[in-house]
Amino acid sequence: MEVSNAKGSARLLHLSLANSRLEVGETFAPSQLQTWLSPQRRSVLLYPDTEDMALGLAAPQTFDAAWLSEPLRLVVLDGTWRKSRKMLYLNPLLQALPRMPLRDTPPSHYLIRKAHLPDQLSTLEATVYALAQLENDHNKFDPLIAAFDGFVAQQASYVRRSV
């Protein structure tokens, strides 16, 4: 799910992953969200283990490693941290999902955007690393990261030409 002013890595991810779904918006009707999060798969939210009492967000359910033996649906929010917290606040069904934090990721390859820390990843990178973590196959998505590097290089060349 992404907000309407996203930079593009979620769209690239969606185009690159079969069986993915991309929904654009900030607030979703609970009945629609419930349909998307149907019980055929356990849904987990790619989001850090954080509580934000200031926003009144529910404490997240802990990710259980035993779930790795069952079909999972990875739900990803695309936006700034501020925007993603707002999306959680506005969508209680998303708050209720167990959260899957990322572990031991490499620095971001998304050099065309401003990041304050090296572990601040694009949506594409975060999702790829989460899928690799879930599937316990850290090299499976290397071709997608390589394609993303090509996209970043192409975008950077446009910036250099316009300067």
Image (spheres, rainbow, N blue to C red):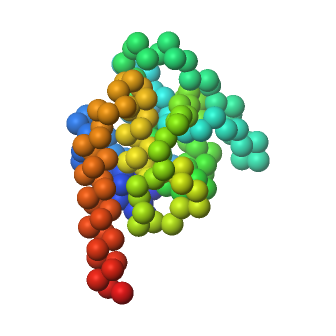
Query: Relative to residue 131, is residue 87 drawn left or right?
Result: right
- Measured as percent of width and height from the top left, residue 13 is found at 31, 47
Q: Nearer the viewer, residue 139 or 148?
A: 139
Q: Nearer the viewer, residue 58 or 159?
A: 159
- Measured as percent of width and height from the top left, residue 19 is found at 25, 34
In the image, what residue occupies the spot 71% across and 43% down?
Answer: 52
Image vertical order of residue 142 relative to residue 147, above or below: above
Q: Is residue 101 visible?
A: yes
- Measured as percent of width and height from the top left, residue 31 is found at 45, 34
Residue with the most extreme bottom position: 163
In the image, what residue occupies the spot 49% across and 55% down?
Answer: 79
Q: Nearer the viewer, residue 146 or 35?
A: 146
Total labels: the figure holds: 0
Quarter residue 136 falls in: top left
Residue with the most extreme right position: 54
- Measured as percent of width and height from the top left, residue 73 is found at 39, 28
Q: Is residue 74 visible?
A: no
Quarter residue 129 falls in: top left
In the image, what residue occupies the spot 36% across and 55% down?
Answer: 9
Query: Relative to residue 72, is residue 158 drawn left or right?
Result: left
Quarter residue 150 falls in: bottom left
Quadrant of the rendering where the C terminus is positioned: bottom left
Image vertical order of residue 155 relative to residue 42, above or below: below
In the image, what residue occupies the spot 38% across and 48% down?
Answer: 124
